[in-house]
Image (cartoon, rainbow, N blue to C red):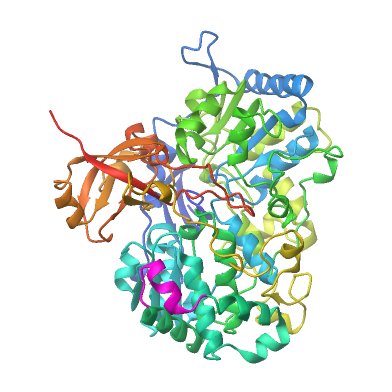
Amino acid sequence: MILDSVCRLCSSCCPIEVEVVDERLIAARRKSFLAPEKRLSCPKLAAAPDIVYSPLRLTTPLIKKDDGSGFRKAGWDEALDRVVTRFLRHREEYGAQSVAWLRGMAADWGAPWDYPNRLMHLFGSPNTIGNGSICFVAREFAHSYTYGAMAFPEAKNARCIIVWGKNDGNTALGAAEAISYAKEQGATLIVIDPVQTALARKADLWLQIKPGHDGLLAMAMISQIIEEKLYDAEFVEKYTTGFEQLKEVAARYPAEAVAEKIWLSADQIRDLARLYATTKPSSIIDGNGLDMHREVFDTTRAIAMLRALTGNLDRPGGDVLPQPIPLRNIQLKDRLPAGVVPITRDYPLFNAFSETWGNQVQGCLIDAILAEQPYPVKMVVVQTGNPVVTMADSTRTREAFAKLETLVVIEMFMTETAKLADVILPAASCFETTQLNRFSIRNNPMFLQNAVIPPVGDSWPNWRIVFELGRRLGFVTEFPWQSAEEAIDYQLEPAGVTVEKLRRNGSGLRIEELRYEKYREAPFKTPSGRVEFFSRRLAEAGLPGVPFSEGLGGDPISFADQSEAYPILGISGSRDIRFTNSQFRTIPSLLNAGAGCVVDIHPEDARRYDLKENDPVRIESPKGSIEMAARISTTVRPGTIRLSWGWGEHDLRGNLNTLTEDDRRGRVTGTSTSRSFMCRLRKVQQQ
C-alpha cells in the first residue's frame, strides 16, 4: 500500500510516499517536481525502516531506580502519575514558573509546539522554551520587523540566486532541487559561505566571507546599490519608510571600508551588489549560518532590506510573502496568572513579536537553573531534544541539568540528556504520528503528516503524551480531544479544512490561489503598513532603528580577544545530511556511510602542525577540549578549521559544544555565537 505523508526526520518536512505492508513500514520516497532521474535522494529517508525498527528504540516508559543505578521499565500510568506528582509538588513548593518545558526540533513547530504551550499556560508557567534564538526564529523576527512576515525564496523561478549561510544539499533537498533547476534554466548562482561547500563549487560566484561578518557585507551592498541608484525607486517611494535614514547609515559602509574586515575585495562586493540589483528576478536563501552569531537580528534585517530595496520582494522568482492558513490559536496564553514573567524576560520584543512563537532564548534556562535568575527553575521537561550535546557550552549545560530536582525526557532513543532523566517517556516516530506541521500552516499548499503505521512497541505520539498529562493535571475540559484528528480539526476550523479533506488531497491542498505583490491590495503587517528601513519600535526600545547604525557591536567571533593564545578560527559545521543534529548516529546504515567525526584542516596548517590524514587532533578553546580525526582539505582557508557537528552523542570526545560559549548574547534575540570561535590545535601523540 502506498500512502501520502510528510517526513519529519529533519525540519524540511518533505512530502513523501510511504510503502506499507501489513502495517509495517517498508520504504519511503520524497515527492518532487523534478523527473525521477533528477531527484535528490535523502539517506535518512532511505534508512527510515532502520530508524523506526531500530533495536535501540525506546518502546516503554522508564523510571530511574531509587538507588540511581539505572532505569526500570514502567507502565504509562505509573510514569505519567510520577510526572504529574512532580509538576504539582514543584508548583506548591516554588511556584508554577519553577517548571519549564524545553523543546528540541524533532517534533515540529506547528501544532506540536502549540500543545505544550497550552499545557504550560494552563498550569501557570510561561516557561515553554524553544531553540529559536539560534535557529530560524531570530531570522523570522528580523523579517517580521522589516516587512511583517518571513519571506520565502522562490528560487525555482529566479534568474539570480544568492545562497547566504546555507547548504541545502545537506539540509533541504527540495530547495536544492529548486536551485539546480533554476541553474539549468540559466540562473546565476552566488554562494556566500566561509567554507567551500559542494554548493559553492557549483556556484558562478563564491564569496569566502569571514564568519560572523555577513551584516557588514549586506550593508556594503546596500551602500553600493543606493550610491549607483540601482534600487527600485518606485517601490521605495510607494511602499517603504525610512529610506533616508538607511541611506545615511549605509554610507558609513562603503565597499572599500568593509572589504578587508570581511576577507573580500571591494571589487567583489561591488560586483555582487550590481549583479543582485540588476538581475531580475533575484532571490536570497538565508540560513542557519547566520543564526548562530550574536548579530543575527541586524544581519538578517539588512539582508531583508536588500530584497525590498531592489524590488524583489513578493514578486515571482523573488522572495514571496506567505499567505498563512486561517488557524485557531489554541495556546491559551490568556490563562497565565497576571504578572508572571518568563525566564526570558530580558528579551521582551523577541518574546512578543509573534502570537505563537513565544519564548525562544534557551540559554536563559541554564541561567535560571544554575544562577536561579530571574528565579529558580527546578523541573524541566525536554521534548525531543538533546540539550546536553546540542546547546552551547556543554560543560555548563550538563552541570545545569544534573542540578535539576526533576528531569523528564520525551524521546525515541536514549541520549546523553535522557541518561540524566528521572522519567523517560518513549515517543513515536513521524511515521507513527498524525500532526499538523508548521510548514503547512505558514503558507499554501497544506500537507498532512499522516500516521502510516501504528506506534512501535508501547511508544506514544507526542500529542497523546501532552494531552494525557494535561488531563491528569486537571485540565480535562481544555484537552477534550481523544485523537490528533479531533485536535487538528478544531484548530483548522477557521480555514474550513479537516483532516479528512487533507487526506483526500495527499499531493497538497491549496485553499487560496498564490498571489504576488499583495502589498498593492493590503498594507504590510508593520506599524507603518510599509517596509520599514527604519523601525520606530526598535528606536523607542533603545535599539538601533536602522541595522548597524551603532556599528558591529564588537567582534562577533567568540574568544576573539584571546586570539594570541587561540590563533585558529574554528567553524561549526558541517551538517551531514545523514543525521539531524545529534540524531541517528546509532543507525549502522547511516553511521558507516560517511567520513565520521573529522576536522577539516588546510594543507598549510597541516604542515605547520605536522598532521597527516586521519591523525588524531586535540582542539582547545577557553571552554574545553575535544578530539577529532584530521581531514586535510582546501575547503577552508589557512588559519581556519571546520569541525564536524553533532557527534557528541556518538562520542563525547567529539562534542563540539564543549568548545562554544553562551557568555555573551545579542541584546535583541539573546543569541550567542556558537558558529565561530577562536581555538588552537595540538597533535595527539599516539602510543
> Which residue is drawn at the image coordinates 84% and 41% (left, top)?
335
Residue extent of the magenta highlight: 253-265
- Who is closer to the viewer here, 522 or 260? 260
The residue lying furthest to the right in this view is 338
Compared with residue 262, is residue 348 higher up or lower down, i.e. above or below? above
- Who is closer to the viewer here, 635 or 437? 635
Compared with residue 195, is residue 671 higher up or lower down, i.e. above or below? above
Q: Is residue 447 visible?
A: no
Secondary structure mostly seen in the magenta stretch? helix
Q: Is residue 515 left or right of residue 196?
A: right
Compared with residue 604, is residue 174 higher up or lower down, i.e. above or below? below
Q: Is residue 663 magenta?
A: no
Image quadrant in which you'd find residue 509: bottom right
Q: Is residue 263 magenta?
A: yes
Residue 565: percent from left, percent from top: 32, 44
- Who is closer to the viewer here, 23 or 631? 631
Q: Is residue 646 visible?
A: yes
Residue 205: percent from left, percent from top: 35, 77
Residue 276: percent from left, percent from top: 47, 82
Q: Is residue 555 left or right of residue 569?
A: right
